[in-house]
Image: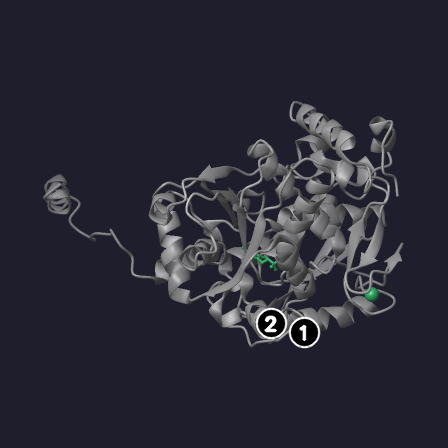
Amino acid sequence: MKTTLPNPAGIISSAGAHALRCVHCGVVQATTDRMFRCHECSELVEVIYPEWSGAGREFGLRLKEIWRERKASTLPEDQSGVWRFRELLPQVDGKHIVTMCEGNTPLLRLTAAARALGLPNLMVKHQGMNPTGSFKDTGISAAISVARSQGFSIVCCASTGNTSASVAAYAARAGIKSIVLLPAGQVTSGKLAQALEYGAHVLQLHTDFDGCLTVLHEVVNKFPAYLLNSLNPYRLEGQKTVAFEMMEQLDWQAPDHVIVPGGNLANSSALGKGFLELQQLGLIRSLPKISIIQAAGANPLVRTMRENGGTELIRVNAETRATAIRIGNPASWRKAATILKTTGGACEDVTEKEIAQAKAELGAEGVGCEPASAATLAGLKKLVHAGFVKAGESAVLVLTGHMLKDVDYMLSDQVKRVYGPMDAAPATVIKTLETIYAGN
Ligand SMILES: *Cc1c(COP(=O)(O)O)cnc(C)c1O
Ligand SMILES: [Zn+2]
């Protein structure tokens, strides 16, 4: 491993050379089986970059310049909020890159919620503003580009909805076929409609998400389709770029806390990996504490951390209206447990009522998101009350999905501030408005 870097430009061209390392036993391998499991112990693997892992701050500073320059470029891979950071991604030939300008999402300041919690620096990173409306696009852009460079013509996934929407769209852009396995009756109509619109082959199974993923394992072993679930380590390389983008938006001052919802538990570790790499390159001084929030009805990680400190997964039967995190047997629990420990983050669960309340509060600030995303604000409130997040600290909530992904959720609650149907007469309307604003 290099410890000094005389010529940062020299390694920039080879920076994306990578290997895969087991997150459990640490064995480094060039390839894995089609399920991305370690040869030795069958645990998951992560991408590592021996070319620059010891490169340090000089290399980091050069990257910062390159990334800034690319913002003025008109090349598709430079306009992508993922591929703009390609020195820290697996090397993929430009002709295989599949991009729709993913990433590039806003960092918005909250006001009412910030005041209520005594956190003046409370922000949301809105990943629902991606091309298909969830953070999954950043991961799928990376992984499907790798799939294409390896010559695959069919990709597949099991999904609670958003992965299928993203896979279907990116496969369509790439001109390759996509197969998605969904739990029948458990995917919101918005997400299902997306997968259909983009031309995926949609198979609805009589099981839950965890059941779909189990079936998919068998399918991938016997059928030549490339797996795009978050077991795929290349997906997480795309997803980690949210940390890079967030730090650019915060002028490289890491917040005290970053809070994410946890389902299959890969996104939390991707985020953590991004921050760790920035720290390794000297681009941020301290790591934010990364906290993970689950729904009380789908809280395997919360129970695992509480009951055995993260050594052995405790599965649950998942039940929550926040369908994107309705997962009882999360594949990446070990990666998530490691990130909690490395960054000193907390792991909490929140009730259905707390999620609905938090979602309404975000909505009242003009910030829409899907229920799973709102779990972050609900969780933050608990962490503030527990004293884990302290007054005056800065926090970023990662909003993972777009509000319009789950319209039924909002309409099924009591609908406030809707009046009528009434006579279509100006006098009737004015009278109603006078009643509404009486006393104001
Ligand atoms: C996929 C998804 C999650 C969960 O992410 P994991 O990596 O599975 O933990 C949370 N929110 C939304 C909107 C999602 O689409
Ligand atoms: Zn191993």
Ligand 1 within 8 Å, label 2 CB = no
What's under tag 2, amino acid-wise?
A: Thr
Can I make out residue 73 in this image?
no
Q: Position of residue 9 (x, y in %)?
A: 84, 27
**In the foreground, 135 or 208:** 135
Mark 2 neighbour class, 10 Å CA radius: few under 14, some 14 to 19, many 20 or more? some
Contact between labelled residues 1 and 2, with CB atoms less than 8 Å apart = yes
Relative to 421, 174 lies left or right: right
Q: From this viewpoint, is residue 162 visible?
A: yes
Circle number at residue 327: none
Observer-nearest of 322 and 223: 322
Name the residue at 82% across, 53% down: 152
Task: Return the x and y of residue 287 as percentages of the image width and height.
Answer: 62, 45
Q: Is residue 343 left or right of residue 177?
A: left
The amino acid type, in three-letter code, at marker 1 is: Glu
Of labels 2 and 1, earlier in sequence is 2
Q: Note whether ligand 2 is within 8 Å of mark 1.
A: no
What element does badge 2 sit on?
Answer: helix
Instruction: Give the labeled residue for mark 1.
Output: 312
Q: Give the quadrant of the C terminus.
A: top left
Q: Residues within 10 Å of mark 1 (few under 14, many from 20)?
A: few
Image quadrant, ligand 1:
bottom right
Foreground of the two, 193 or 291: 291
Q: Badge 2 is on which residue? A: 304
